Image (tube, rainbow, N blue to C red):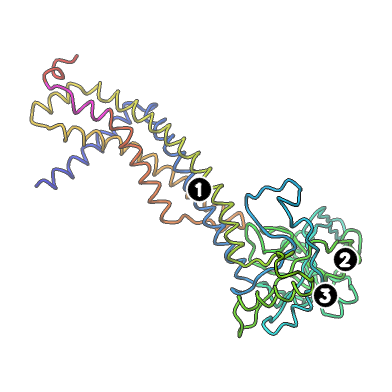
Amino acid sequence: MLRFRGVASVFEGVGIAFDAIRANKVRAGLTILGVAVGVFVVVAMSAAVHGINASVARDLESAGPTSFYVYRVPISLGEACDGTDDTCPWRRNPPLSIDEAAAIGRLESVEAVTAHIGTNASFKYHDRLLRSAGLDGYTPNWTDVDGGDIYPGRSFTYAEHQTAARVVIVNEKMATQLFNESDPIGKSIDVNGVPFTVIGVYHYTASFLGKPGSSTSGDSPMAIVPLETVRRDLGASLHWLDLTVKPRSTASQAEAIDDVTALLRARRGIRPATANNFAVVTSDRLLEVYNGFFGVFFLVMVALSGVGLMVGGVGVVAIMMISVTERTREIGVRKALGATRRIILWQFLVEAATLTSIGAVAGLIAGSIVAQLVDRLTPIPASIPPGAVVAALAASAFTGILFGMMPAARAARLDPIEALRYE
C-alpha cells in the first residue's frame, strides 16, 4: 500500500510539473534549455572522445600489438621547453639514420623495421591541383609493419627505392580528387612539379588522427613514395626520420626494445651513466599521450556543461518558487487533509527533477543526432558510451533535486492555517 502511494505521488508530481510547464512556458523553456545545453555538451563530447580513443587504439594496433616506434625526441604532454638544454635536452639529439634502421633490422628479435619521413607537397594531374597534401617516404618493407592494403596496383620494390624511382602510391581520397572514377594506375602526376607514375592505390581505414608517424590525419589525401626518392628528388630532410619496429613472434616486445636500445647506445657510443639520445615509444605510451590530451579537452567541456546545468538550476529555483507561491492555498488544503511535510517535500522535488529530466532527454536526443552526423561525415567513429547517458540523466536529476530543495522545503514548512488564508 505504501509502495502504491509512493508511485502515485511520483506520477502526481510529474503531472503537476507538466502543468507548470504549460502555465509558465517561457520560464520552463529557459530552465529546460539550460539543462539541455549542459547535457548536450557532455553527450556530444563523450561520443567524440570515445570514438577518437577507439580510433587511435585501432591505428596503434594496425602495426601489430607488439610493435613500437623509435623517435629522435621523446613524446610528452604538458612539459615546458624554453629552448635551453635544462628544459629540453633532447634538442641536441642526433637524427636517426637509414644505417641504424638497417642494423636494427638485423637483430634476432626484430622481424621488420621501416624508416619514415613525412612532409607536404603539391599534386597535379592535368587541370586538377591539390596545393598541399601529405607525402610520406618509406623504406621498401613498410608494408610489413602497416595495417593497410594496396589495390589495385602494388608497392615499390627495393630496386626502385635504391634508385630513387619516381613512383607513387596514392590513397583513396587523393585518387578520387585527382582522377575521379578513372583508373589511376600508370598515370603520370606532378609532385612539386616532378613527374611521378602512379603504381598503386592505398586503402586504410582512416581515423581522426591518422596513423602514427604519418604526415596526415583522418581521411585527408596523401601519397607514399620511396624514402630515397623523397630525399633526392623532392628535397625532404631526414632530420626527423622515425622508425617503426615489429618484433618477431618468438620475442616479446620488452626483449626487442632492450635489443634496439642496446644497439643504438653502442652505435652512438653512449656511456652507461648517460641518458639515451633517442626515444623508444610503445603504443601504450602513445595512447596515454592521446588520452591525456583529450582528457584535458574533455574536462574543459565538462566545466562548460556545468555552466549550462547551473543556468538550468537557477531556472528551477525561480520556477519552483513561483509555483510554491501560486499554490499556497492548495498546499494548505493538502496539509489540512493530512498531507505531511515529507509528502509535500517529495512532491515538489519530483516536480523539479521532472523539469530537469525533460531538459536531459532533449540534450540526449540532440547529442545523439550530432554523434551520428560526426560518425557519418568524419573519420571519427563517434558513439555514445552508456556511462555518458547514465551520467547525464543522473546529473540532471541531481540538479533538479539540489536546486529544487529550497522551494520544496519552503512549501513543506508552510503553516496550513496561514496557507489557507493566503490570497
Q: Nearer the viewer, residue 33 or 300?
A: 300
- Quarter of the image for residue 28 reads top left
Q: Which residue is mark 3?
A: 99
Residue 9 % position (x, y) = 18, 39
Q: Residue furthest front?
A: 273
Quadrant of the image containing the C terminus: top left
**Which region of the structure is painted magenta?**
407-416
Q: Which residue is mark 2?
A: 231
Q: Comparing marks 1 and 3, which lies closer to the viewer? A: 3
Badge 2 crowding class, 10 Å Cα cut-off, few under 14, some 14 to 19, many 20 or more, is some
Disc on the earlier residue, 1 or 3? 1
Give the overall secondary structure of the magenta segment. Answer: helix
Q: Comparing marks 2 and 3, which lies closer to the viewer? A: 3
Please state which amino acid type lies under the numbered disc 1: Ala
- Quarter of the image for residue 312 reads top left
Distance Cα–Cα, label 1 vs label 3: 47 Å
Please state which amino acid type lies under the numbered disc 3: Asp
Label 3 sits on a secondary structure element that is helix
Please state which amino acid type lies under the numbered disc 2: Arg
Q: Residue at point 14% right, 48% down?
A: 3
Badge 2 vs badge 3, beta-carbon distance below 8 Å: no
Residue 383 left/right relative to 353: right
Label 1 sits on a secondary structure element that is helix
Badge 3 crowding class, 10 Å Cα cut-off, few under 14, some 14 to 19, many 20 or more, is few
Distance Cα–Cα, label 2 vs label 1: 43 Å
Q: Residue at point 38% right, 43% down?
A: 395
Q: Nearer the viewer, residue 303 or 416?
A: 303
Q: Is residue 378 above or below residue 324?
A: below
Q: Which residue is mark 1?
A: 44
